[in-house]
Amino acid sequence: MNSESNHESRATNHEPRTTSHEPRTTTRVYVFCGTGILACFNTKTGKKIWDVDTLKEFEAENITWGITGSPLIDGQKVYCTPGGKKGTVVALDKMTGQTIWATTGLSEASAYSQLVNRE
C-alpha cells in the first residue's frame, strides 16, 4: 500500500474513534466517528437512538486523519467540533440529536483535540 492510499484509508475510516458516556447513567453512550457522524447508542441494547452527520449538517470538510475529538456531555447538551461554515463548535440535545446552538462566522476546521468543561 502506498502512502497516498494509506492516507485515504485513514481519513475515511468509518469506525468510532471517540466516545463519551454519562457518568450518572449507564444507558447512553455518544460516539463521534472519524467521518463526522455523531451518534447516541443505548448501552444495554446496543441500538442506535439517533445520529447526525455533522460534516453535512454544519457544512464542514473532514480533516486529514478524520475527526478525533471526544464529545463533551454537559447537562442536556452534547458538544462536538465538526468545524464548518455553520458550526465550528455545536451543541446538540443529548436526547434527540437536534441542534441547540452552533457557532457561526468562525469557519475553522476541526482539530485533533477535545472540548473541556471549565467552570
Image: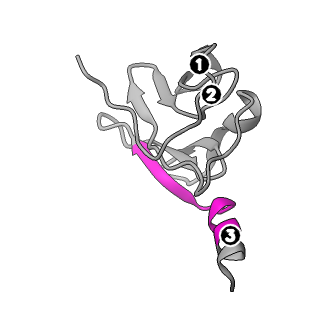
Residue occupying the far front of the picture: 3
Neighbourhood count class around disc 2 (C-alpha, 10 Å): few under 14, some 14–19, many 20 upward: some
> On the image, numbered disc 3 is attached to which residue?
9
- Residue for point 66% across, 29% down: 84
Q: Which label sits on residue 89?
A: none
Q: Earlier in the sequence, mark 1 or mark 2?
A: 2
> On the image, numbered disc 1 is attached to which residue?
106
Residue kind at label 2, given as amino acid type: Gly
Neighbourhood count class around disc 3 (C-alpha, 10 Å): few under 14, some 14–19, many 20 upward: few
> Quick one: quadrant of the C terminus?
top left
CB contact under 8 Å: marks 3 and 1: no
> Residue 101: where, in percent of width, then height?
58, 13
For marks 3 and 1, give the CA distance: 29 Å
- Residue for point 66% across, 51% down: 35
Horizontal side, residue 54 vs residue 91: left or right: right
- Would residue 70 be counted in the magenta stretch? no
Q: Which residues are magenta?
A: 7-20
> Residue 69: where, in percent of width, then height?
46, 44
